[in-house]
Amino acid sequence: MLENIRIAVIGLGYVGLPLARLFSTKYPTVGFDMNPSRVEALMGGHDATLEVSDDLLADAINNHGFRCSSNIDDIRCCNFYVVAVPTPVDENNRPDLNPLWSASETVGKVISKGDIVVYESTVYPGVTEEECLPVVERVSGLKFNIDFFAGYSPERINPGDKSHTVEKIKKVTSGSTPEVADVVDSVYNSVLVNGTHKAPSIKVAEASKIIENSQRDVNIAFMNELAKIFNAMGIDTHDVIEAASSKWNFIKLSPGLVGGHCISVDPYYLIQKAQVYGVLPRVMSNARRLNDGMGAYVANQTIKLMNKKGVLVKDSKILILGVTFKENCPDIRNTKVVDIYHTLREYTPNIAIYDPWADPEHVLHEYGVEVTRSGSQVIKQSNYDAVILAVAHNEFLEMDVRSLVKGGGVIYDVKGILPRDVIDGRL
């Protein structure tokens, strides 16, 4: 059956594009996205997310027939649909399933008898079968597990990570029947270096993904809580972690800002669903609150250091290095650096943000905050009262950060990567 597979990947973001590119090396593949400008850029040979290099994208287009489209008619010929759209939360941290519903409507308009639809978007257990597939049924007029079939294979893309690329990731797969589970597993296995883990059901696969990120969220929250405790005690948290990690079974993690599209969002999906079943997930909820408050904590720690050194906080001149949610990556989704900015704005309007990776127009659109990509401009405007290193971009490791602050100014290192004799405080 695999020789007849024709794949459509719906959603060409950080998850969908690398997967579609990989599938195209083995199967006829079309990438579908509702954004025509995104499609145009990709067919022009460049991925703004930087997840797929220009060389790989050109190879897929020129040598494997890969194409992208915003025209739904271009995916009617496919029989294996993969949905890879975002699963955000709203302003109240409630799951927003609108992108999934919309993508399911798209699938419903083109799916035919015998076809398979596989969801990759991170969800709480039950979303695929209870929320998405009924939409496909309604739009298509076909019956699930009679006329068409489904699977779930949670994404494991780590933005900016050039070691754990999609072809090297071991993927979880599942299907709505044992036979379909085998087909889905075989399709993924055929393009993955490290194979798959076939889960016994779609709900198990959904649950496995959401606890991957929830576990990291809870573990990082513990480190952040330790950082607050040890900072109050005058003990360097990183020194404590180094000492503790000398034990063979200690899990070494660092405190920090928890943003991005996964760890800072996915736990809310399970938290909400757990409450439907009468379970109050206290550990996960507390971890989310603690991690969501770390941006404000960093700002307040910086202000505290400025006060101790006699630096006037009101109308002071502050530089924040980095705005993306992680290092060496242009992804700004749910970045907690903006929380540092907004907390500091209560004291001074003179705040500059420098990030060589972030798109200034994108940051301005999403957060209403101005960012510069020009390092020379930042250096020329030095003499800052405080500098906060918020993201560990390689460019910042090569900078003489101390030269950016005036005498007596404060340097706060969120990531714990600057030399000890350069900084005044770190998380």
Image: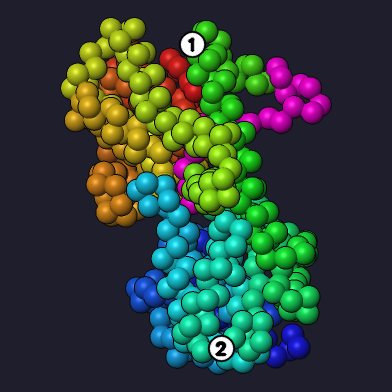
Residue 24 visible somewhere in the drawing: no
Magenta span covers which residues? 243-262
Instruction: Identify the coloring.
Output: rainbow
Image: 331 above or below 143: above
Structural crowding at the residue carrying mark 2, measured as other residues with C-alpha within 10 Å and reported as few (<14), some (14–19) or many (≥20):
some
Residue drawn at x 45%, y 55% is: 95
Per the image, label 1 sits on a secondary structure element best described as: helix
Q: Which of marks 2 and 1 is in front?
A: 2
Per the image, label 2 sits on a secondary structure element best described as: loop
Identified by mark 1, the residue type is Ala
SS majority, magenta:
loop
Residue 265 counted in the magenta span: no
- Would you say the residues marked 2 and 1 are in contact, meaning their CB atoms lie under 8 Å apart? no
Query: CA–CA distance between discs 2 and 1?
Result: 61 Å
Give the labeled residue for mark 2: 142
Identified by mark 2, the residue type is Leu
Residue 219 visible somewhere in the drawing: yes
Residue drawn at x 59%, y 70% is: 129
Instruction: Work out whether residue 212 or residue 337 is closer to the camera in this orientation and state it.
Output: 212
Based on the displayed image, in which of its 4 quarters is residue 150 positioned? bottom right
Per the rendering, the mark at residue 232 is 1
For the N terminus, the image quarter is: bottom right
Residue drawn at x 52%, y 8% is: 233
Image: 175 above or below 275: below
Left or right of residue 225: residue 72: left
Residue 108's x, y, as percent? 50, 83
